[in-house]
Image (cartoon, rainbow, N blue to C red):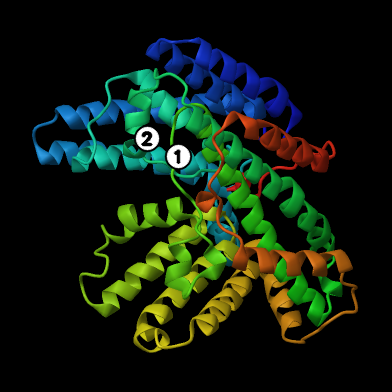
Amino acid sequence: MVFNSDIFLFAFLPVVFVLFWWLRDKKARYLLLTISGYVFYGYWDWRFCFLMLFSSLVSFTSGLMIQRAREQRVKRAWMIGTIMVDLSLLGFFKYYNFFAESVHAVAPAFAPPLLHIILPIGISFYTFHTISYVVDVAAGRVRATNNLFEYLTYVSLFSQLVAGPIVRFRQIEDDLERIDKPPQTDEMALGIGFFAVGLIKKVVVADTIAGLVDPMLANYHDLSMAGAWFAALGYTFQLYYDFSGYSDMAVGLGYLFGIRIPQNFNAPYRALGIGDFWRRWHISLSSWLRDYLYIPLGGSRRGPIRTNVNLMIVMLLGGLWHGANWTFVIWGAYQGLLLVIDRTLEPWTKRWPPLLLRWSTFLLVIVGWVFFRSESLPMATEWLGKMVGIGTGTGDIPRTLMVMCLLCFVAVNTLPETWDIRFPKTVRWAPVYALSLVLAYVFMNGSDSTFLYYQF
């Protein structure tokens, strides 16, 4: 089930919304949100609901045991054990065949057999939710909840279940504790506003560009030099409007149920350096990697060489987290190398004109997205080769794509982020919100296209 589908917009969401505000009891609302989260998830494949439930029960129990333990070694043992369980599940379902294929490529005699494994949707995201919870409990940053349905609500909250943002328990703990509060007009207005903007980003912008870029990349052998650049630029905007649109919709849905989900994007294509880019792009992931991987590795406290090594490790794993493909590993290595260079040259680059910094950063990001979008390393290398005039074809560039790229370039450099919009909170603006949703629905044209980050 996706946010831009008829069944979600006209059946699932209205029913859950009405029932939620009709129920007044805290336990009843926890139960409703938990059940709705599992229905939302199970609509794709109900069998994997048990996997998510198992992961949730393990981390919930571990949190309680860590909270009750007096000795630090016992707390640490529970934390490490839970992390190993979570990562083992993620590793098996997402990376087993990738590992087997990689071994087979270099040592066929030692390669384990390939298995028919279905990747559970959203497993990368809810695994990070459960890991952050037990680590925070062990570190004393949050108290373990003894309310099972409160915790199940946190993990299975349908607004951010399958593609983020990656929400930490302590970020929404207060809202979950006050889940029985009466509806707030300002939150409803924010919810509808965020959801409308996100839906427009997805179905009007991202899907339109996808319809132009995907056919070009399906025949990437025929790309001309200009076509290769426009395909890369188009995908750059498609990915941003698709994922930021999803994130806006997730935030909006959270507000509709009184839960404040944190910001995930902050004008990333206006970044003044790669480090700045990662403070603006997929904020919930980059901050998660910083707090739960980079800092535990030593961060920047052990000298420049160790800092650079830590950056490379984090970005390599961050790339692999996105998908079991060498293209993501290379993309992660590329981003790590750029971060190392950015950090090394910062004393000089900070003197550059802001416009030069912004455009050079944007160019480097575009090149990185080539690896991110490519289905294989040969595709990535050929695509990049065509961008510098090697082996170019004669494929045409849709004029609509040129116009969309120009409009998107202007938009990302001038329009405010959704979080900076002051949504009117009075009733008289309700028709405007309704009209925005209707227009977005018209653009959907019966399409239930999935969000790009669902695959991760």
Q: Which residue is more in the foreground, 38 or 391?
A: 38
Q: Is residue 375 visible?
A: no
Quadrant in which residue 139 is drawn: top left
- Mark number displayed over residue 50: none
Residue closer to the observer: 439 or 337: 439
**Residue 172's disc number:** 2
Q: Is residue 341 above or below residue 419?
A: below
Q: Position of residue 189 (x, y in %)?
A: 55, 34
Name the residue type under label 2.
Ile
In this picture, residue 24 sits left or right of residue 3: left
Give the SS element for disc 1. loop
Q: Position of residue 101 (x, y in %)?
A: 60, 56
Mark 1–mark 2 Cα distance, whole angstroms, equals: 7 Å
Q: Is residue 84 left or right of residue 226?
A: left
Q: Position of residue 83 (x, y in %)?
A: 33, 42
Of the two numbered discs 1 and 2 on the same chain, state the one appearing first in sequence. Answer: 2
Crowd rating for badge 1 (residues with CA inside 10 Å; few <14, some 14–19, many 20+): many
- Type of residue at label 1? Ile
Q: Secondary structure at mark 2?
A: helix
- The residue positioned 81% from the left and 67% from the top of the image is 403
Q: Which residue is mark 1?
A: 261
Q: Quadrant of residue 55?
A: top left
